[in-house]
Image: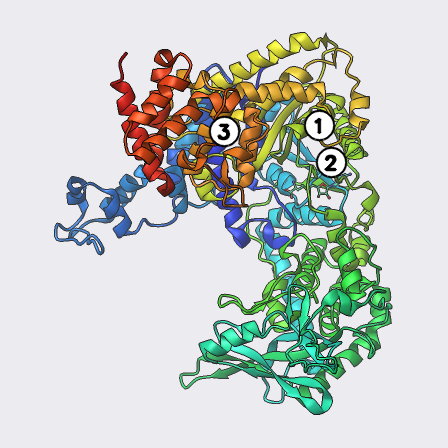
Amino acid sequence: MALSFIETQFPVSKLSKESYKERKSNYSQTLTGLGKWWGRKPLILVRAVILGLLLPATDDPKKDREIFLKILTMDDEGLWQRKAKQIALKDAYGLLSASERKKWFDPDSEETKPKLKKGIQTEEREALQRFVFDRLSYDDKLVYCDRPEQIDGASEQAWEEINAYLSTTATNLPELTQQLGIKQFGHVPRVGDAFCGGGSVPFEAARIGCEAYGSDLNPVATLLTWAALNIVGGGKEVAEQVRQAQEQVYEAVDRQITEWGIEHNEAGWRADAYLYCNETQCPECGWMIPLAPSWVIGEKTRCVAKLKPDSANKRFDILIESDVSASEMTAAQIAGTVKDSKLICPNPHPIDEDGNQPSQETPISLIRGREGLRRWENSDLIPRQNDVLQERLYCIRWVKTYFDAKGKERKERYYCAPDQQDFDREAKVLKLLEERFHDWQEKGYIPSRQIEPGDKTDEPIRTRGWTHWHHLFNPRQLLVLGRFFEEIFSGLDFEIHSVVLNVLGAGRCCDYDARLSRWHSNAANEKSEQVFSNQALNTLLNYGVRTTLSLSSVFSIECSSTDAVNNGRIETFDARKCSTTCDLWVTDPPYADAINYHELTEFFLAWYDKPLQRLFPKWYTDSKRALAITGKDESFRKSMADCYRNLANHMPANGYQVVMFTHQDSGVWADLALILWASGLRVTAAWCIATETSSALKEGNYVQGTVLLVLRKQTSDATAFLDEIYPKVELEVRRQLASMLALEDEEDPNFGDTDYQLAAYAAALRVLTQYQNIEDIDIAYELSKPRKKGSDKSEIEKIIDQAVVIACDYLVPKGFDTFVWKSLTPEERFYLKGLDIESHGEYRTGAYQELARGFGVKDYKPFLESGKANQTRLKTATEFTTKNLGDVGFSASLVRNALFAIRETVRTESTQQGKSWLRAEVRDYWNQRKNAIEILRYLATMGFKMNHWSVDAKAAEILAGALENDSV
Ligand SMILES: C[S@@+](CC[C@H](N)C(=O)[O-])C[C@H]1O[C@@H](n2cnc3c(N)ncnc32)[C@H](O)[C@@H]1O
């Protein structure tokens, strides 16, 4: 069967950079605005994967790559086409040589403020932009570019070249994918994702012209995916229609809230934030203490809360002051009454009768008591009088709107402590809510579901006593949010797109307006944050409440007015039950995934329950916890194999799957091999896309990334024997790595060390999974076997480890002689390569751990000067002192002896001792001398890269010179 592009190569480095750019663009990402989802895959990655599967590989890999990049507008011309920002004159000037500058710049220009020559025309300016743009690296070019999805596609000329090469007649991406699909499958390609999450795969598949299918166990996921396809991909008309519908709902809610008068004060100012804190009694002094980790309210406005003792009532008044001095800001920070989960009582506790000084600190867990907190009942909306944790409004931010002398509208914001009228309004809010509470619960405007205990859902139950999802919202929040849902319900019979978007808008409001919404005091914010700023349900001792005013931008979801995309089908399904056949399955399963989708989404499902029943009667509305795939153990492996077997059964013989997951260690790879193998699939390629930090990307190494595993149906019935597998794996690993090296671009490297290691895993998997059986390995048994840490490795794991050891031959530090490298032991390689990554600023322990694993080094700790998180580094020559010298292993190795010789050179300030040491200790010194020189020269380069190496590196350089001149 002919190979597809992605089975032979993939531009991993460029795609990593594009993916990173997309991820960093935050809310301008196409689907992010629809609502919270954890870990949406970058759309550019999905686009590249689908095209990589549809594009055939030819015997001209360079040209294949050129065309592939053209289609994605990731070639030079495409990047120029995407350039949306001007390169500043100062930057352009800096990129030119003195003679080049003469062409465009005034000769009297200053470096800091260069001026163009007089009379320079637009065309010449453009030529300057192009000239300097071409000079930039890929990363630097991206700074000035839009994302590929933001432009209209490749240029006319590019399409001519693409069509000539592929024998197609496309003028845009959808036409191309359709024509390629017809060539390969006889119809428009069907792309499916049975773990569709936030909808990246179905959305992008539809957008580039494929037939899309998406399903997920979780209805929040399918709702987001449905909205991605039908609303974001609905075209301009839908965008306008939903915009109007959102406006209508918002205006109706706003009218009602204004009418109730619960967000306005007597002066007509409107509140845009309310701050609440918990309050509890100090067990030592009996005072009621307001709880907050800090009393800073705003760093920009320099606003703080101050606790003023009210001895008569054994409580504190809370004063709010703005524009305070720097020392008052610091004092407010220090005055926090909760630190490290302990109540810090601000009252001095007098010495008791026995002369003991009672503690100022009480652990919050002690305050909650041994029995824990009282469990709230459904109708509890605020704490009861005797509850341990009380709740208190302590600050309101008012917005005063007025017109200045020129008739221009102005806004001023003031933080104030609540007064009696504000407390009256609080009472009114509670009354309004109580009047509606049961009716609204019944109608589904506010949640009525109980919180089921679980890994993530235990926290609100344990730390607050909340038992129902609506307890996560205070009365003000429930009233406003309930009012949104009431309004949305009143229009439920309206057009589905509008209703879905309104539900999602209200869902976003829930995320930004709960008792779990942290108040951000930092200067750029001074607002409350979303509940799901991380992957948990963290309860807070003080929190911010948004008002209808500050929810406005949260509720209205801007849908970019893209052209309408191909429609797709979306369903709620367990992947084991999915019955749709797709040519290409592109999935990102919850693999070794710490995200507890099912529990976290119950927060939203508590609100969406009734609307979903009406909007999508065929979907269920709960999270199906029991069916969610989680964990790493045997039941996880079995469920995954069941899912993938089902998907393999629902693809044609010439179909493909791409499975994405986070890069893991060899144990996980062995599991994966078993899972996919048991599912009737075979691996054909693997690529790693890094989506972490740009600096890490530049170094190219050891970045946790997304692995793409390319798979086909397993059709062979052959059995292999272990003794024939090993040499085959070795051959395949070498073949794979050699082909990657042959394709490598010296100027703009595509592959880093991780890619070579990964390719080795993939090559091993490719050999293993092409057989139906391997000797007497019983896959079903292996899958169901519990894995214990430290237990013997399975045969599969051994084969995979072996593959990685072979790959390590290829992890030669830059500038190090390959021949000498091959003569070194795994420990020596680990140390030298470790220095290479350290010199690139790698201080994460995990990176060294992974490296050690790759080289098969069991105990790498003796090599470390520091093993602290994010401060990990290797010992220098001097830091090894006299340790690890001996007759066997690393202790007797050439690298260790060279390090000791350096140490001696530094210590005695002469090369004599070091040289004598090497002569005496290195076996076969005269034959090893050249290798020793290579090692010393390499160590000498560390001085330029790392300060702590400067002395040792100099010594290494002198010693290398001394060895050069050494003679018998
Ligand atoms: C890593 S996420 C997918 C993210 C998605 N690719 C995106 O770009 O947003 C994994 C998904 O698997 C879903 N899932 C978990 N167990 C499942 C099952 N048994 N059947 C189908 N989907 C399941 C989760 O709900 C979650 O949405």
Evaluate whether residue 919 shows in this view: yes
Evaluate whether residue 252 shows in this view: no
Q: Position of residue 238 (x, y in %)?
A: 62, 53
**Residue closest to the eye, 151 or 399:** 399
Instruction: Confirm or reject: label 1 Cβ below 8 Å from ligand 1.
Output: no
Tell me the kind of residue under disc 1.
Asp
Q: Which residue is mark 3?
A: 884
- Residue that appears at 69% across and 38% down: 592
Q: CA distance from mark 2 to mark 1?
A: 9 Å
Q: Which residue is mark 2?
A: 632
Secondary structure at badge 1 equals helix
Q: Earlier in the sequence, mark 3 or mark 1?
A: 1
Dot 1 alpha-carbon crowd within 10 angstroms: few under 14, some 14 to 19, many 20 or more: some
Q: Quick check: which quadrant has ligand 1? A: top right
* Residue closest to the far bottom: 312
Tell me the kind of residue under disc 2.
Lys
Query: Label for residue 671?
Result: 1
Q: Earlier in the sequence, mark 2 or mark 1?
A: 2
- Residue that appears at 55% across and 48% down: 562
Q: Is residue 448 left or right of residue 875?
A: right
Secondary structure at badge 3 equals loop
Q: Position of residue 577 (x, y in %)?
A: 81, 34
Q: Position of residue 680 (x, y in %)?
A: 74, 21
Viewer-nearest of discs 3 and 1 = 3
Dot 3 alpha-carbon crowd within 10 angstroms: few under 14, some 14 to 19, many 20 or more: some
Tell me whether the residue at label 2 lies in contact with that at label 1, contact meaning CB atoms closer than 8 angstroms. yes
Dot 2 alpha-carbon crowd within 10 angstroms: few under 14, some 14 to 19, many 20 or more: some
Tell me the kind of residue under disc 3.
Asn
Secondary structure at badge 2 equals loop
**Residue closest to the eye, 358 or 287:** 358
